[in-house]
Amino acid sequence: MQQFFIDSTLEINQEKKLKDDIAHQCIHVLRYQDGKMIRCVDQDGKLALCKIRLNNEELFATPIEFVTNNAEMNCKVTLIQALIRKEKWEYCIQKATELGVYRIVPIELKRNVVHWEKQETNRKLERYQKIMTEAAEQSRRNNIPKLENIIQLSDIDQYKSEINFVAYEAEDSSHLRDHLNHPESITIICGPEGGFEESEVEYLVKHGFISVSLGHRILRAETAGLYILSGIDFMLEGIKNA
Ligand code: SAM
C-alpha cells in the first residue's frame, strides 16, 4: 500500500483533498481507482489508512482508521556529509533515509572535489529533499528526514548531538562500536572522496567529536555514512526493541 506525507492533520471520516503531485501519481502513474486504500502520514506524524475518491484530476482521501507505525530509530542520527559527486550524493541521501537518518547536513571541507555554486544551491536542496521524501514514503517512515543547507566546519557546533563522532580514515585505535551506549542522539561527520585533512580532525576533536575508525577497509564516501547508520540501527534498535 503506497504511502504519502500530507501537510495537514487527518481526522477519521473527514475527507481531505490531496496535493496535485500526489493526485497525478495516483491517477496517472499508479492508475488507482475509486475505493483504493493508501497510507497517509499527516503533519503530526499520525498514520491513517485512507480510502480514495477521484474527481477528474482531483484526488480525495478519507481516513478510515489510524494505525501505529514505529518506523523511526529511537536514536536521532544527524549525518554531516561532505559534498560528493552528484550520483553518489543522491544514492547516499536516498539510502540514508531508508536507514533511518534523522537529519542530513551537507558540509564543505578542504578536500571536497565537488562545490555547489551559490545560485544553484536552493534548486539542489529542493531536488534532494524530494529524493528524501520519496525514500521516506517508500520505506514507510513516520517522518521525512530534514536536509539542511550547506555548512562550513566553523558552523559545526549547532549540529552536535549527545555524542559526536568523526569517521576518520586514519584513525587506528578507536572503533565506532567502542563508544555506542544508548544516546538519544548522535552526530557523525564523514569526509569527501579525498578524505579529511588532519587539521580538520583536530578542529573537530577540539569541538567534542570523537575520532573513530569504521574498520580496516577504506569505505567510499557514500558508503561510510550508510555503514554507520546500519551499525547504529542494528546495535541500538535491536537491543531496545528486543
Ligand atoms: N582518501 C581517503 C584515503 O584514501 O584514505 C579515503 C576517504 S574515504 C573515501 C571518505 C570518507 O569515508 C572518509 O573521510 C571517512 O569519513 C570515511 N571512511 C571511509 N573508510 C573509513 C574507515 N575505515 N574508518 C573511518 N572512516 C572511514
Image: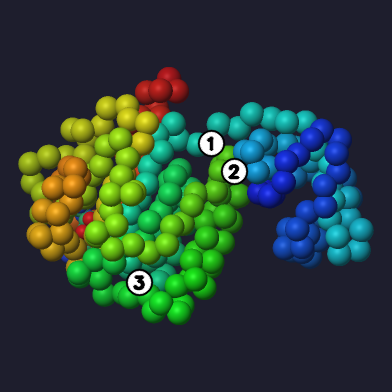
Residue at (25, 42) in percent of width and height: 164
Mark sitting earlier along the chain (2/3): 3
- Disc 3, ligand 1: is the CB inside 8 Å? no
Quadrant in which the C terminus is drawn: top left
Q: Amino acid at mark 3?
A: Arg
In what quadrant does ligand 1 lie?
Answer: bottom left
In the visual, does 91 lie left or right of 158? right
| Occupied quadrant, residue 177 | top left
| Separation (CA) of disc 2 from disc 3 | 27 Å
Q: Are marks 2 and 3 in contact (CB under 8 Å)?
A: no
Q: Quadrant of the N terminus?
A: top right
Q: Are marks 1 and 2 in contact (CB under 8 Å)?
A: yes
Residue 2 in view of the camera: no
The residue indicated by pointer 2 is 140
Distance of mark 1 from mark 2, alpha carbons? 7 Å
Callout 1: helix, strand or loop? loop
Q: Residue at x 33, y 75 (%)?
A: 115
Front in this rendered view, residue 108 or 114: 108
- What amino acid type is highlighted by mark number 2? Arg
Q: Which mark is residue 71?
A: 1
Is the residue 125 above or below the residue 139 in the image?
below
